Image: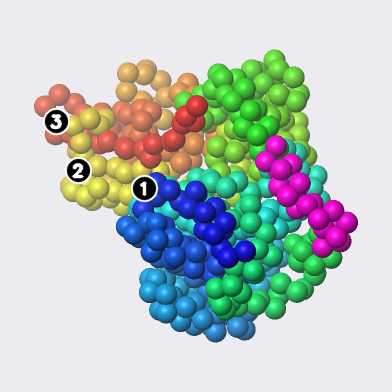
Amino acid sequence: MNGARIQMQIASKITGYSHLMVAFSGGLDSTVLLHALIELRIKTFPDLKLHAVHVHHGLSPHADSWADHCKLVCREWMVQLNVVKVNIDSKLGGVEAAARNKRYWAIANTMNKQDILLTAHHLDDQSETFFLALKRGSGPAGLSAMASCITFFNSQHIRPLLDISRAQLEEYAKYKNIKWIEDYSNQDNRFDRNFLRLEVIPNLRNRWPHFTKAVARSAKLCAEQEDLLDELLQESLKALTNKDTSININGLLQISEAKRYAILRRWIAYFKVMPPSKKQLQRVWFEVAMARLDAKPQLKLGEYQIRRYHQHLYLLPMLTVLKEKVIQWNPDTILLLPDGLGTLQLDHRGICVRQPKVNEVVSLRFTAHSRICIINRTHSKQIKKIWREHNIPPWERERTPMLYYGEELIAILGICITKNGEAMVHEPFWKINWTKNICKSIIL
């Protein structure tokens, strides 16, 4: 192969894009990809803006020399290169996954607004990914393996070499007299992917020469089935999902088990959470959705949690405890509330409360006494009843900012004003506006 097919394959994937960033490790795959793109820029895409990023994990004693190699290659090929260092604790389990996640975060932080990310995953990688999913007992979503184009943060991630084998990449590199790095750890078959690459797939390919292509076809068929299911379930998911992104348990009870789990999986996928296993989905349903009505169930799912309130399921990030937090506020400034709760400022759109007296310190807190007196009410009321009246879920009750003057509760922002905070006629007043961070809704 003289490289024409590889370049044609890449050209078909990048047409229409003007800014490309290549994830460049210095290994065979990414070196061939970068070289082919440079030749395509000369011959076909003269206006193409091309640069590369190398992520320095520090996991290997050779990491510095690999970074130096990448710098040398990019200098010779006149390609701008960013080398980004990330720190990964090799003593922790799941080093491969941790390295991958850190790598993608580092790459995303390096990309310009117009950049499209290109990685050099190839046909053999696709087979390995398929087998790893098979080992985990994955369904069609997992067996879809790697897509040729996916959303990547606010951009796109393209894999233009998925139809090209490693052997073809080696042939290209030898024909073009390209040198690359060999990572010694790729020969360590203690890692599952290496075991498949070194021990399993070669035997299968010796028996059936076109085996990896057949696996790729199966992965593509699984992906098509998933796309079809997405399309068919779109209206049901939309009907069951509220504007606050919660999902209706009573509605889920009315459909078959298979459809219920398929919808739950797609609801969770919206939040970019690691796809749950069948066992995890069953736990979501039986331990959270079907828990006793008087229970307050929650289930950890990666860095998120699933909770229930008023027969709806909510998927939330792990929340910081703010109960003891006290924040003094100078109202001449905009206050940035903790943990992404938004901002507070004087604003004509806000609630109307009396101005503090000279000796009263203004602060924000996240807890109050068990009973409070609010305006337009004759008697004091338990705060838990106020929460219920306003349908405030339990996890939001200690995350709702409360305005204090000294030790007097003036207002629960967004909920009520106390009698201590009421602005009398002709009395100086403030209008305080709490701008919440907008919760994204599922767009279907």
Do the residues under discs 1 and 2 have CB atoms within 8 angstroms? no
Q: Which mark is residue 337?
A: 1
Disc 2 to disc 3, how far (Cα)?
11 Å
Q: Quadrant of residue 404?
A: top left
Q: Which mark is residue 56?
A: none
Do the residues under discs 2 and 3 have CB atoms within 8 angstroms? no
391 relative to 153, above or below:
above
Name the residue type under label 2. Lys
N-terminal of the pair, mark 1 or mark 2, is 1
Specify start and end residues of the magenta stretch as a single range.
202-221
Do the residues under discs 1 and 3 have CB atoms within 8 angstroms? no
161 relative to 1, above or below:
above
Q: Which mark is residue 357?
A: 2
Q: Secondary structure at mark 1?
A: loop
Name the residue type under label 1. Leu
The colour scheme of the drawn protein is rainbow
Disc 1 to disc 3, how far (Cα)?
28 Å
The percent position of residue 23, horizontal first and vertical second, equals 51, 64
- Note whether residue 276 is visible: no
Q: Residue at x 70, y 25 (%)?
A: 260
Name the residue type under label 3. Glu
Mark 1 crowd level (few <14, some 14–19, many ≥20, 10 Å Cα):
some
Q: Residue at x 43, y 66 (%)?
A: 38
Mark 2 crowd level (few <14, some 14–19, many ≥20, 10 Å Cα):
few
Horizontal relation, residue 311 to residue 408: left or right = right
Q: Is residue 220 magenta?
A: yes
Q: Which mark is residue 427?
A: 3
Q: Quadrant of residue 281?
A: top right
Q: Residue at x 43, y 43 (%)?
A: 366
Disc 1 to disc 2, how far (Cα)?
24 Å
214 relative to 250, above or below:
below
23 relative to 58, above or below:
above
